[in-house]
Amino acid sequence: MGTRVLPTEPVGSIPRPERYQRALASIRNQALIDQEAEAAVRETVARFEETGSPIITDGEQTKSSFLHYVFEGADNIGPGSIAIGFTDGHKRDIPQLLAGPFRYGTYADKYVRQAKALTKRPVKVAVMSVHALSLIYPAGGIDGYSKDQFLDDLVAEAAKEIVLCFEAGADSVQIDWTEGRLSLKLDPSGAFLDEGIRLNNAVIAAVPDKYHDRIGLHTCPGGDRDSTHSADVPYEALLARMFEINATRFYLQMISEPDYEEALRVVGKHLRKGQIAYVGVTNHLVEEVETPEVVRDRILLAAKYIPIHQLGTTDDCGFSPFTDDLSTSRDTAFAKIKARIDGNALASAALLG
Ligand SMILES: [Zn+2]
């Protein structure tokens, strides 16, 4: 087997251990929560290493969710009026800004530091896209703090967070843009999608060029409790625009599409020079664990549509974007990651020699 392998990265989140879940749910015993949180990160990093993954994450163990962590510690955020609906009927709320100026309560470099203290492997981290965060500005406005001022602050905060993550030693930073596809459902005119592309590009432009080849973007139709929020929006409508974003790495939900091969064709059509498509080859929505051979064949099919030097692999989504999402077990999540790593090695041997 050759030593060259296609680049492969996880999306990030891993279901939290039951002990940690119980500590969070039962009583407000902060010492116990802190103790279980530390144990969860430690065990997650160790299990990630065991999969052979060349790049690992902290499993987002201590993020309240991929979106809400930003507000932890902020005192000007309250309950919002917008909720994202999922196909199984459950909803997730988006909070509301009560007063300006907007500053992140938590920056994700904290998670990079925690994980790097536990491993010598490269660590990646996910950060929230400003597109969904822009929804926290109230429809009625805020006296003395305009929407434009808010958006300027938001973009500056997001760029600051990405730089902090790289300075903390992150190998790559992934912008979670799950609302990309959703935006076409919220606003079929496409204006809100345009806004998302503009805002994400403003953030990337505000980050020094030296980091640009390690900035990525993840998209999916949502993946919470094995349910989605925007899979009914035609993927091509998003993919035809997505690569206008000046990220280098694109972590794409693919295998859980009804027509994987068609999605590959569309990605191959729109991917720009210098961009790398990390194709989702393990399905987070089903419990059955893929075999390495199945993963290999999915990658070989991808190579028919995407140039090999622009092809990478990933999982379709994080395995638990919200703390309380227990629809997938930890064992299943790590088994799927291991199947991806092993299948990626098999496909690399076939493609790269
Ligand atoms: Zn996702």
Image (cartoon, helix red, strand yellow):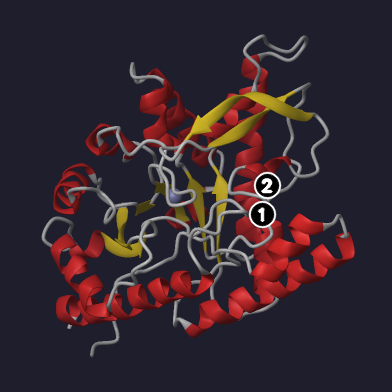
Give neighbour class at mark 1: few <14, some 14-19, many 20+ (Cα, 10 Å).
many
Query: Number of labelled discs?
Result: 2
| Residue sitting at x 55%, y 59% | 326
Q: Earlier in the sequence, mark 2 or mark 1?
A: 1
Q: Is any atom of residue 344 visible in this view? A: yes
Asked whether the beta carbons under mark 2 and mark 1 sit within 8 Å of each other, the answer is yes
Q: Is 102 on the left-hand or right-hand side of 254? A: right
- The residue identified by callout 2 is 69
> The residue tagged with tag 1: helix, strand or loop?
loop
| Residue type at numbered disc 1 | Lys
Q: Is 196 on the left-hand or right-hand side of 94? A: left
| Residue type at numbered disc 2 | Tyr
Q: Position of residue 192 (x, y in %)?
A: 43, 22
- The residue identified by callout 1 is 63
Q: Quadrant of residue 151?
A: top right
Q: Is any atom of residue 168 visible in this view? A: no
